[in-house]
Amino acid sequence: MTARVVVLVSGSGTTLQALLDAASDPAYGASIVAVGADRHGIEGLTRAEKVDVPTFVCQVTDYPARTEWDAALTEAVAAHEPHLVVSAGFMKLVGPEFLDRFGGRMVNSHPALLPSFPGMHGPRDALEYGVKVTGCTLFFVDGGVDTGPIIDQRVVPVLATDDVNQLHERIKVAEREMLVDSIGRLAREGWTVTGRKVSIP
């Protein structure tokens, strides 16, 4: 069975493109069945439309309360009956209703080796702290910020000459590879979560 995947984006969609490319091979095991965004007119939506993947937009400002946005996003995603939901640069935190429906099935990545340097500025914080290696983490989303069970991690060395942008660009390369590899494995092989430990057979 091919796993159905909904991808959520907020920007240019380079990670989405990597997933679309991988999913074009039937052996990958996952199919991108829809792409959702939190704003109109972004390149990520254009990338999906070019390959005839359905798209939808749920803007927070279109709803009187954040809870109503969360409910609308939940229903928009649920309409596509996904096995997995992938946050690929989606810059909004989902709420309790979304997690009630998709908890344990929503995947996000972070540009640091969690639990170190959570939050919005992982590469900057790692560089300022003076670590010699950092990297990226793929995890199942829970109610916290970058706190869910870890699926995979990749290490990226910090170079003496790095500024934040240089380091972040190298992390992004590792992040895309990790995400594509892991989504394929989750789709093909399934997974179990015991406590904080994620196992892929």
Image: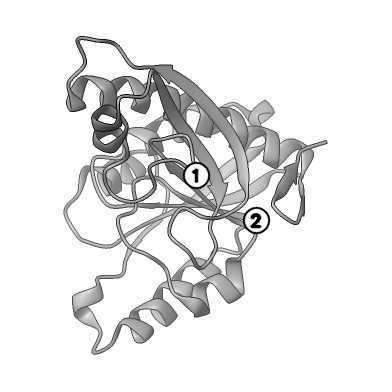
Q: Tell how many labels.
A: 2
Q: Residues within 10 Å of mark 2 (few under 14, many from 20)?
A: some
Position of the N terminus by quadrant: top right
Q: Where in the figure is residue 11, as x and y percent of width and height?
A: 24, 46
Furthest-bottom residue in this view:
64
Q: Nearer the viewer, mark 1 or mark 2?
A: 1
* Residue found 34% across the figure and 79% down from its top: 69
In the rendered structure, the answer to whether residue 76 lies left or right of residue 153 reads left
Q: Give the residue at x 45% y 42%.
A: 109
Q: Which residue is mark 2?
A: 83
Between 150 and 189, the one lying in front of the other is: 150
Residue 106: x %, y % from top left:
55, 56
Instruction: Classify the position of the C terminus by image quarter.
Output: top right
Q: Residue at x 59, y 28 (%)?
A: 181
- Residue 9 percent location from the top left of the image: 34, 51
Using residue 132 as the reference point, say whether residue 198 is left or right of it. right
Mark on residue 115? 1
Is 117 left, or right, of 27 in this rendering? left
Q: At label 2, which amino acid type do we have?
A: His
Of 182 and 59, nearer the camera is: 182
**Disc on res. 173:** none
Nearer the observer, 92 or 56:
92
Determine the CA span between mark 1 and mark 2. 26 Å
Q: Residues within 10 Å of mark 1 (few under 14, many from 20)?
A: few
**Up/down of 106 relative to 2, above or below:** below
Task: Give the mark nearest the N terminus, 1 or 2.
Answer: 2
| Quadrant in the picture for residue 92 | bottom left
Q: What residue type is disc 1 on?
A: Pro
